[in-house]
Image (tube, coloured by chain):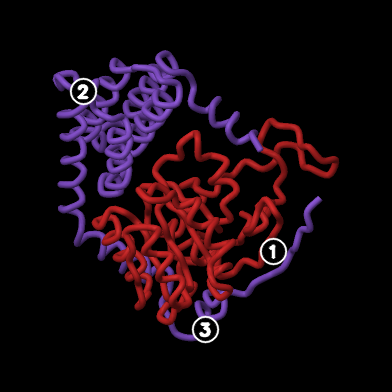
Chain colours: A purple, B red
Amino acid sequence: MSKVRKFRVKSRLATLAFQSGGISANQALKQADAGLDTLREEGLAALDAAIAEIDARYGPNAAGRTAEPLEDLYRLSCGVIDMALFVPGSGMDDCARSFCGLVDLSHELDIQAWDAIDVHIEALRLLRQAGAAMSAPQRQSILDGLIQVTRKRVGDPNEYYDRAAAAV
Amino acid sequence: MAYGSVLASDKINLEKIDFLLIDPNSFFLDIMAQVVGGFGVRSITRCSTAAEARTILAERVIDFILTDANMPDESGYDFIEWVRRHAIEANRFVPAIIVTGHTRISQVARARDCGAHFIIAKPITPKVILERIFWVGRENRMFIESDTYCGLDRRFKTEGPPAGMAGRRAEDLDGAGQDDDNDDDLVSPIVAPKVAL
Protein backbone atom coordinates (compact mmCIF):
# COMPACT_ATOMS: atom_id res chain seq x y z
CA MET A 1 0.00 0.00 0.00
CA SER A 2 1.30 3.42 -0.89
CA LYS A 3 2.32 5.90 1.76
CA VAL A 4 -0.22 8.63 2.45
CA ARG A 5 1.04 12.03 3.52
CA LYS A 6 -1.27 14.42 5.37
CA PHE A 7 -0.31 18.01 6.01
CA ARG A 8 -1.68 21.53 6.23
CA VAL A 9 -0.70 24.42 3.98
CA LYS A 10 -1.40 28.03 4.88
CA SER A 11 -2.07 29.86 1.64
CA ARG A 12 -1.21 33.47 0.90
CA LEU A 13 -4.93 33.99 0.54
CA ALA A 14 -5.44 32.89 4.14
CA THR A 15 -2.58 35.13 5.26
CA LEU A 16 -3.47 38.28 3.35
CA ALA A 17 -7.22 38.27 2.78
CA PHE A 18 -8.16 39.00 6.36
CA GLN A 19 -5.58 41.66 7.11
CA SER A 20 -6.72 45.15 7.92
CA GLY A 21 -8.30 47.18 5.17
CA GLY A 22 -10.25 45.65 2.38
CA ILE A 23 -13.96 45.86 1.74
CA SER A 24 -17.08 44.29 3.18
CA ALA A 25 -18.71 41.30 1.50
CA ASN A 26 -21.70 43.46 0.80
CA GLN A 27 -19.60 46.10 -0.93
CA ALA A 28 -17.68 43.46 -2.86
CA LEU A 29 -20.92 42.04 -4.20
CA LYS A 30 -22.26 45.44 -5.16
CA GLN A 31 -19.06 46.21 -7.05
CA ALA A 32 -19.08 42.83 -8.78
CA ASP A 33 -22.73 43.25 -9.79
CA ALA A 34 -21.97 46.71 -11.12
CA GLY A 35 -19.12 45.25 -13.18
CA LEU A 36 -21.36 42.54 -14.57
CA ASP A 37 -23.96 45.13 -15.53
CA THR A 38 -21.46 46.62 -17.96
CA LEU A 39 -21.38 43.26 -19.77
CA ARG A 40 -25.10 42.53 -19.71
CA GLU A 41 -25.96 43.62 -23.26
CA GLU A 42 -23.03 41.79 -24.75
CA GLY A 43 -23.94 38.74 -22.67
CA LEU A 44 -27.53 38.71 -23.87
CA ALA A 45 -26.34 39.08 -27.45
CA ALA A 46 -23.99 36.11 -26.96
CA LEU A 47 -26.86 34.11 -25.46
CA ASP A 48 -29.12 34.84 -28.43
CA ALA A 49 -26.31 34.08 -30.86
CA ALA A 50 -25.71 30.69 -29.23
CA ILE A 51 -29.40 29.77 -29.43
CA ALA A 52 -29.58 30.93 -33.05
CA GLU A 53 -26.53 28.86 -33.96
CA ILE A 54 -27.96 25.79 -32.23
CA ASP A 55 -31.19 26.19 -34.17
CA ALA A 56 -29.46 26.88 -37.49
CA ARG A 57 -27.12 23.89 -37.25
CA TYR A 58 -29.12 21.37 -35.19
CA GLY A 59 -32.76 22.48 -35.40
CA PRO A 60 -35.51 20.63 -37.28
CA ASN A 61 -34.98 22.76 -40.39
CA ALA A 62 -31.22 22.26 -40.53
CA ALA A 63 -30.80 20.01 -43.56
CA GLY A 64 -27.29 18.90 -42.74
CA ARG A 65 -27.66 18.45 -39.00
CA THR A 66 -26.86 14.75 -38.94
CA ALA A 67 -23.41 15.62 -40.26
CA GLU A 68 -22.79 18.28 -37.61
CA PRO A 69 -20.58 17.21 -34.69
CA LEU A 70 -22.42 16.73 -31.41
CA GLU A 71 -19.33 18.13 -29.68
CA ASP A 72 -20.20 21.57 -31.06
CA LEU A 73 -23.78 21.25 -29.85
CA TYR A 74 -22.47 20.39 -26.38
CA ARG A 75 -20.14 23.40 -26.45
CA LEU A 76 -22.93 25.72 -27.59
CA SER A 77 -25.25 24.44 -24.86
CA CYS A 78 -22.51 25.06 -22.30
CA GLY A 79 -22.28 28.59 -23.70
CA VAL A 80 -25.98 29.07 -22.99
CA ILE A 81 -25.38 28.05 -19.37
CA ASP A 82 -22.51 30.55 -19.14
CA MET A 83 -24.66 33.42 -20.36
CA ALA A 84 -27.74 32.40 -18.38
CA LEU A 85 -26.33 34.47 -15.53
CA PHE A 86 -27.77 37.46 -17.40
CA VAL A 87 -31.30 35.99 -17.35
CA PRO A 88 -31.71 34.85 -13.76
CA GLY A 89 -34.94 33.09 -12.95
CA SER A 90 -35.66 32.19 -16.56
CA GLY A 91 -34.91 28.48 -16.23
CA MET A 92 -32.53 28.70 -19.18
CA ASP A 93 -29.62 27.35 -17.16
CA ASP A 94 -31.54 24.21 -16.17
CA CYS A 95 -32.81 23.78 -19.71
CA ALA A 96 -29.32 24.08 -21.18
CA ARG A 97 -27.93 21.71 -18.54
CA SER A 98 -30.55 19.16 -19.52
CA PHE A 99 -29.51 19.73 -23.13
CA CYS A 100 -25.87 19.08 -22.23
CA GLY A 101 -26.89 15.90 -20.42
CA LEU A 102 -28.88 14.72 -23.42
CA VAL A 103 -26.06 15.41 -25.86
CA ASP A 104 -23.43 13.88 -23.59
CA LEU A 105 -25.44 10.72 -23.06
CA SER A 106 -26.34 10.50 -26.77
CA HIS A 107 -22.65 10.67 -27.54
CA GLU A 108 -21.70 8.12 -24.86
CA LEU A 109 -24.34 5.63 -25.99
CA ASP A 110 -24.13 6.46 -29.70
CA ILE A 111 -27.86 7.17 -29.87
CA GLN A 112 -29.57 9.54 -32.32
CA ALA A 113 -32.11 11.60 -30.38
CA TRP A 114 -33.15 14.34 -32.77
CA ASP A 115 -36.71 14.53 -31.48
CA ALA A 116 -35.39 15.18 -27.97
CA ILE A 117 -32.94 17.73 -29.36
CA ASP A 118 -35.83 19.50 -31.10
CA VAL A 119 -37.78 19.66 -27.84
CA HIS A 120 -34.79 21.18 -26.05
CA ILE A 121 -34.27 23.80 -28.74
CA GLU A 122 -37.93 24.75 -28.56
CA ALA A 123 -37.72 24.97 -24.77
CA LEU A 124 -34.64 27.19 -24.97
CA ARG A 125 -36.44 29.58 -27.31
CA LEU A 126 -39.55 29.61 -25.15
CA LEU A 127 -37.66 30.22 -21.91
CA ARG A 128 -35.58 32.95 -23.51
CA GLN A 129 -38.75 34.75 -24.60
CA ALA A 130 -40.93 34.17 -21.56
CA GLY A 131 -39.12 32.14 -18.90
CA ALA A 132 -38.52 35.00 -16.51
CA ALA A 133 -42.20 36.00 -16.65
CA MET A 134 -43.49 32.47 -16.07
CA SER A 135 -44.51 31.17 -12.67
CA ALA A 136 -42.16 28.71 -11.03
CA PRO A 137 -44.58 25.79 -11.61
CA GLN A 138 -44.83 26.71 -15.30
CA ARG A 139 -41.06 26.69 -15.67
CA GLN A 140 -40.81 23.48 -13.72
CA SER A 141 -43.34 21.76 -15.94
CA ILE A 142 -41.19 22.59 -18.96
CA LEU A 143 -38.07 21.28 -17.24
CA ASP A 144 -39.92 18.15 -16.12
CA GLY A 145 -40.88 17.58 -19.73
CA LEU A 146 -37.24 17.84 -20.78
CA ILE A 147 -36.24 15.31 -18.14
CA GLN A 148 -38.93 12.94 -19.32
CA VAL A 149 -38.04 13.17 -22.99
CA THR A 150 -34.36 12.65 -22.17
CA ARG A 151 -35.12 9.58 -20.07
CA LYS A 152 -37.34 8.19 -22.79
CA ARG A 153 -34.81 8.64 -25.57
CA VAL A 154 -31.42 8.03 -23.95
CA GLY A 155 -32.03 7.05 -20.32
CA ASP A 156 -31.63 8.75 -16.97
CA PRO A 157 -28.37 10.71 -16.85
CA ASN A 158 -28.38 10.45 -13.04
CA GLU A 159 -28.04 6.67 -13.22
CA TYR A 160 -24.96 7.05 -15.39
CA TYR A 161 -23.57 9.68 -13.03
CA ASP A 162 -24.00 7.33 -10.09
CA ARG A 163 -22.22 4.55 -11.93
CA ALA A 164 -19.41 6.86 -12.99
CA ALA A 165 -18.99 8.20 -9.46
CA ALA A 166 -18.93 4.69 -8.03
CA ALA A 167 -16.16 3.65 -10.42
CA VAL A 168 -12.70 3.85 -8.93
CA MET B 1 -22.89 24.64 7.12
CA ALA B 2 -19.45 23.12 7.14
CA TYR B 3 -17.50 26.37 6.94
CA GLY B 4 -19.51 28.64 9.14
CA SER B 5 -21.23 31.76 8.03
CA VAL B 6 -19.99 34.86 6.26
CA LEU B 7 -21.68 38.09 7.19
CA ALA B 8 -22.40 40.80 4.67
CA SER B 9 -20.32 43.10 6.87
CA ASP B 10 -17.32 40.71 7.00
CA LYS B 11 -14.27 42.25 5.38
CA ILE B 12 -11.92 40.78 2.85
CA ASN B 13 -8.74 42.25 1.43
CA LEU B 14 -7.74 40.83 -1.94
CA GLU B 15 -5.58 43.72 -3.10
CA LYS B 16 -2.35 41.72 -2.87
CA ILE B 17 -3.75 38.43 -4.15
CA ASP B 18 -2.64 37.31 -7.61
CA PHE B 19 -5.54 35.69 -9.42
CA LEU B 20 -5.21 33.40 -12.42
CA LEU B 21 -8.34 33.08 -14.56
CA ILE B 22 -8.51 30.38 -17.23
CA ASP B 23 -11.28 30.01 -19.79
CA PRO B 24 -11.27 29.45 -23.55
CA ASN B 25 -14.01 32.03 -24.01
CA SER B 26 -12.62 35.56 -23.86
CA PHE B 27 -16.00 37.02 -22.98
CA PHE B 28 -16.34 34.65 -20.05
CA LEU B 29 -12.88 35.75 -18.95
CA ASP B 30 -14.24 39.30 -19.00
CA ILE B 31 -17.12 38.17 -16.79
CA MET B 32 -14.86 36.48 -14.24
CA ALA B 33 -12.47 39.44 -14.28
CA GLN B 34 -15.34 41.83 -13.56
CA VAL B 35 -16.48 39.67 -10.66
CA VAL B 36 -13.11 39.27 -8.93
CA GLY B 37 -12.17 42.84 -9.83
CA GLY B 38 -15.31 43.90 -7.99
CA PHE B 39 -14.05 41.98 -4.98
CA GLY B 40 -10.98 44.21 -4.91
CA VAL B 41 -8.50 41.98 -6.74
CA ARG B 42 -5.90 44.14 -8.49
CA SER B 43 -3.70 41.50 -10.10
CA ILE B 44 -5.62 39.37 -12.59
CA THR B 45 -3.86 37.18 -15.14
CA ARG B 46 -6.05 35.78 -17.90
CA CYS B 47 -5.31 32.64 -19.90
CA SER B 48 -7.36 31.02 -22.64
CA THR B 49 -5.64 27.63 -22.52
CA ALA B 50 -4.19 25.32 -19.92
CA ALA B 51 -0.86 25.43 -21.74
CA GLU B 52 -0.71 29.18 -21.32
CA ALA B 53 -1.56 28.82 -17.64
CA ARG B 54 1.21 26.26 -17.14
CA THR B 55 3.69 28.78 -18.49
CA ILE B 56 2.47 31.40 -16.04
CA LEU B 57 2.68 28.96 -13.13
CA ALA B 58 6.23 28.08 -14.06
CA GLU B 59 7.25 31.72 -13.98
CA ARG B 60 5.70 33.14 -10.85
CA VAL B 61 3.70 32.47 -7.74
CA ILE B 62 -0.08 32.58 -8.09
CA ASP B 63 -2.40 32.91 -5.11
CA PHE B 64 -5.71 31.72 -6.52
CA ILE B 65 -6.81 29.81 -9.62
CA LEU B 66 -10.29 30.05 -11.07
CA THR B 67 -10.57 27.81 -14.11
CA ASP B 68 -13.20 26.48 -16.45
CA ALA B 69 -13.61 22.71 -16.62
CA ASN B 70 -14.00 22.46 -20.38
CA MET B 71 -10.97 23.73 -22.24
CA PRO B 72 -10.01 22.67 -25.72
CA ASP B 73 -6.48 21.59 -24.97
CA GLU B 74 -6.98 20.02 -21.57
CA SER B 75 -9.81 19.69 -19.06
CA GLY B 76 -9.74 21.88 -15.99
CA TYR B 77 -9.67 18.69 -13.91
CA ASP B 78 -6.52 17.43 -15.61
CA PHE B 79 -4.98 20.87 -15.29
CA ILE B 80 -5.58 21.09 -11.53
CA GLU B 81 -4.27 17.56 -11.09
CA TRP B 82 -1.12 18.63 -12.93
CA VAL B 83 -0.82 21.65 -10.62
CA ARG B 84 -1.05 19.41 -7.55
CA ARG B 85 1.55 16.98 -8.88
CA HIS B 86 3.93 18.90 -11.05
CA ALA B 87 3.76 22.66 -10.60
CA ILE B 88 6.62 24.40 -8.84
CA GLU B 89 6.44 23.89 -5.09
CA ALA B 90 5.19 27.43 -4.41
CA ASN B 91 2.18 26.82 -6.62
CA ARG B 92 1.38 23.16 -5.99
CA PHE B 93 -1.14 23.76 -3.23
CA VAL B 94 -2.58 27.02 -4.49
CA PRO B 95 -6.30 27.45 -3.82
CA ALA B 96 -8.13 26.34 -6.95
CA ILE B 97 -11.76 26.46 -7.96
CA ILE B 98 -13.20 24.91 -11.10
CA VAL B 99 -16.37 26.29 -12.68
CA THR B 100 -18.49 24.15 -14.97
CA GLY B 101 -21.91 24.30 -16.52
CA HIS B 102 -22.13 20.54 -16.91
CA THR B 103 -19.90 17.64 -16.05
CA ARG B 104 -19.64 14.96 -18.69
CA ILE B 105 -20.32 11.45 -17.48
CA SER B 106 -16.83 10.50 -18.61
CA GLN B 107 -15.39 13.25 -16.37
CA VAL B 108 -17.25 12.59 -13.12
CA ALA B 109 -14.44 10.60 -11.52
CA ARG B 110 -11.87 13.12 -12.77
CA ALA B 111 -13.84 15.93 -11.14
CA ARG B 112 -13.93 14.03 -7.85
CA ASP B 113 -10.25 13.17 -7.90
CA CYS B 114 -8.56 16.24 -9.36
CA GLY B 115 -7.73 17.94 -6.05
CA ALA B 116 -9.53 21.26 -6.54
CA HIS B 117 -10.80 23.12 -3.49
CA PHE B 118 -14.29 23.45 -4.93
CA ILE B 119 -16.20 22.85 -8.13
CA ILE B 120 -18.82 25.51 -8.75
CA ALA B 121 -21.81 25.13 -11.04
CA LYS B 122 -22.36 27.74 -13.72
CA PRO B 123 -23.96 30.11 -14.29
CA ILE B 124 -21.67 31.79 -11.83
CA THR B 125 -22.96 34.39 -9.40
CA PRO B 126 -20.76 36.81 -7.49
CA LYS B 127 -22.18 35.68 -4.17
CA VAL B 128 -21.23 32.03 -4.71
CA ILE B 129 -17.72 32.94 -5.89
CA LEU B 130 -17.20 35.33 -2.96
CA GLU B 131 -18.46 32.81 -0.46
CA ARG B 132 -16.06 30.18 -1.73
CA ILE B 133 -13.17 32.63 -1.53
CA PHE B 134 -14.05 33.31 2.09
CA TRP B 135 -14.29 29.60 2.77
CA VAL B 136 -10.99 28.81 1.11
CA GLY B 137 -9.31 31.61 3.05
CA ARG B 138 -10.71 30.48 6.37
CA GLU B 139 -10.57 26.73 6.08
CA ASN B 140 -7.95 24.53 7.57
CA ARG B 141 -8.52 21.31 5.67
CA MET B 142 -5.59 18.95 5.38
CA PHE B 143 -3.96 18.12 2.11
CA ILE B 144 -3.75 14.44 1.27
CA GLU B 145 -0.99 13.18 -0.99
CA SER B 146 -0.85 9.57 -2.12
CA ASP B 147 -0.18 7.62 -5.29
CA THR B 148 -3.77 8.05 -6.42
CA TYR B 149 -4.79 11.45 -5.09
CA CYS B 150 -3.26 14.80 -4.28
CA GLY B 151 -5.51 17.52 -2.97
CA LEU B 152 -7.61 18.66 -0.08
CA ASP B 153 -9.22 16.11 2.18
CA ARG B 154 -12.56 15.49 0.51
CA ARG B 155 -14.20 14.25 3.71
CA PHE B 156 -14.73 17.63 5.28
CA LYS B 157 -18.33 17.42 6.37
CA THR B 158 -19.65 15.88 9.53
CA GLU B 159 -23.35 16.00 8.87
CA GLY B 160 -23.55 12.32 7.93
CA PRO B 161 -24.72 10.58 4.79
CA PRO B 162 -27.33 12.04 2.42
CA ALA B 163 -30.91 12.06 3.59
CA GLY B 164 -32.52 8.68 3.51
CA MET B 165 -29.27 6.77 3.14
CA ALA B 166 -27.60 4.57 5.69
CA GLY B 167 -24.05 5.51 6.61
CA ARG B 168 -21.11 3.24 5.95
CA ARG B 169 -19.60 3.79 9.36
CA ALA B 170 -21.02 3.07 12.79
CA GLU B 171 -20.56 6.68 13.85
CA ASP B 172 -22.37 8.14 10.82
CA LEU B 173 -25.45 10.16 11.61
CA ASP B 174 -28.61 8.84 10.07
CA GLY B 175 -29.28 10.78 6.89
CA ALA B 176 -28.61 14.14 8.42
CA GLY B 177 -26.41 15.58 5.69
CA GLN B 178 -28.78 17.15 3.26
CA ASP B 179 -27.27 20.42 2.21
CA ASP B 180 -25.68 21.00 -1.13
CA ASP B 181 -22.62 23.23 -1.22
CA ASN B 182 -23.88 24.84 -4.36
CA ASP B 183 -27.46 25.12 -3.22
CA ASP B 184 -28.75 28.61 -3.71
CA ASP B 185 -30.71 28.36 -0.49
CA LEU B 186 -27.43 28.02 1.31
CA VAL B 187 -25.81 31.06 -0.20
CA SER B 188 -28.68 33.42 -0.97
CA PRO B 189 -28.62 35.14 2.40
CA ILE B 190 -25.33 36.79 1.45
CA VAL B 191 -27.31 39.67 0.01
CA ALA B 192 -29.10 40.28 3.27
CA PRO B 193 -27.06 42.50 5.60
CA LYS B 194 -26.20 41.02 8.98
CA VAL B 195 -27.35 37.59 7.87
CA ALA B 196 -25.19 34.56 7.27
CA LEU B 197 -24.06 34.02 3.67
Mark 2 belongs to which amino acid? Arg
Across and down, in percent, residue A152 comes to 42, 13
Label 2: few (<14), some (14–19) or many (≥20) C-alpha neighbours in 10 Å: some
Chain on which label 2 sits: A
Q: Position of residue A160 (x, y in %)?
A: 54, 27
Image: B174 above or below B33 = above
Please report, as a chain letter, where disc 3 is located: A
Q: Secondary structure at mark 3?
A: loop
User: Mark 2 or 1, which is nearer the eye?
Assistant: 2
Spot the residue most to the bottom: A20
Identify residue for label 1: B142
Above or below, comparing residue B102 to residue B147 in the picture:
above
Quarter of the image for residue B37 reads bottom left
Residue marked by disc 2 = A65
In this view, A92 is above or below B98: above
Q: Residues within 10 Å of mark 1 (few under 14, many from 20)?
A: some
Query: Which residue position holds label 3?
Result: A19
Is the residue at mark 3 from the same chain as the one at mark 2? yes
Mark sitting on residue A27: none
Image quadrant containing the N terminus of chain B:
bottom right
In terms of secondary structure, where does tag 1 sit? loop
Q: Quadrant of residue B162?
A: top right
Question: Which of pointers 3 and 2 indicates the residue nearer the eye?
Answer: 2
SS for tag 2? helix
Q: Residue at x 28, y 36 (%)?
A: A72
In this rendering, would A127 be left or right of B119?
Answer: left
Amino acid identity at mark 1: Met
Give the side of residue B77 with respect to residue B100, left or right.
right
Residue B70 location (% of width, % of height): 39, 47
